[in-house]
Amino acid sequence: MMRVVTLAFSFVIGISLGAAHAQEACTGTDLRAEIAPEVLDDLLMRVRDEPFGEGIAYEATRGADRITLFGTLHSAAPDVPALIAERVAGADLVFLESTLADQQALRADMQADTRNHLRPDGPPLSSELTADRWAILSEAAAALGMPSAAVDQFSPWFATLFLAVPACEINAQRQGRASLDQRLEAIALESGIPTRSLEDAQTALDVFSDQSEEDQLALLRQSIDGVADLNNSFITARNTWQEERPLLLFFLMEHVAAEDDTDTATPELLGQLDEGLLRDRNAAWLPRILEATDNADEIAVIAGALHLPRQTGLLQLLSDAGFTVTRLPLN
């Protein structure tokens, strides 16, 4: 089962989830191996039919203004493309979904005020899951150093985050390999380039925490049921990103959900992802980016790769604002 929350934290939400323990490499099977070739061809056609459906690096120019947009995989695995490193180091301003300083402030706020992600007076989370599901969640949390007694007090949305990214990926960052977004931010800071968050670090998490309790539990159960495919989902996300077709994974998940009569949660969850995590955030980011062009000619925007394509993506929004948008070759 392909997992909505893995898609979100691979391509959409630029927030570090924390640290884990022993080191291991991420291995798995690309889930496209299970899909008929003719279906994959149709999905690829859908990708190509979308505005800016392929590509992870673009520039948008208007007069003296040039905005470099790079769609990331929120992972420690990829190397920084030389062209993007050059553009970041030469920018007047670099936007990230959330700067490291803002993420650290968010973690401090969450430690100081636990009302949004803990519910010590509510029903224990274990009482709302089957015994098998609770065992899977407890095991996953234990691998990240989180005792089951603590997990039992989590709000469902917060527990889901511990199933978002495979331990091998978190371990890589634990061992000192920063995420792609963080390495690009480091290049900017080392070059003396100011950085700025596109949004408050809490914004993306609010999309999950603002869901009804029923929807939060549906997402948690879907994530638990798909935990066996967590590495495979992540490997598929990584591969489609390397091929510069991250939108293919989104369409692949839509297809699998439509074919599975027993999976009634994924189509709705994908719709929520599309609206709350992509469309609404893109629309909110655009004015910030445009306002920055008043004082900066060279701007770099670093964000999850799914923020770029389609009619509601950043590239089309910039095109509608009068920018000429051109794909940048990375090889």
Image (cartoon, grey):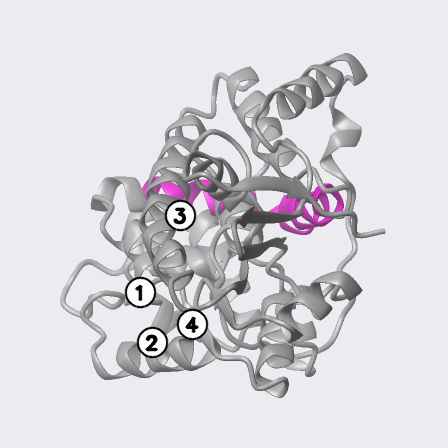
Which amino acid type corresponds to the residue marked 3 in the rendered image? Leu
Residue at 23% over, 74% down: 114
Residue designated by label 1: 202
Residue designated by label 4: 196
Q: Is residue 150 above or below residue 28?
A: below
Quadrant in the rendering for residue 51: top right
Give me the C-alpha separation between circle 4 and circle 3. Answer: 32 Å
> Which class describes the residues within 10 Å of circle 1: few (<14), some (14-19), or many (20+)?
some
Closer to the observer: label 1 or label 3? 1
Give me the C-alpha separation between circle 4 and circle 2. Answer: 15 Å
Closer to the observer: label 4 or label 2? 4
Residue designated by label 3: 220
4 or 1: tag closer to the N-terminus: 4
4 or 2: tag closer to the N-terminus: 2
1 or 3: tag closer to the N-terminus: 1
- The residues colored magenta run 217-241
> Which class describes the residues within 10 Å of circle 2: few (<14), some (14-19), or many (20+)?
some
Residue designated by label 2: 106
Which amino acid type corresponds to the residue marked 4 in the rendered image? Arg
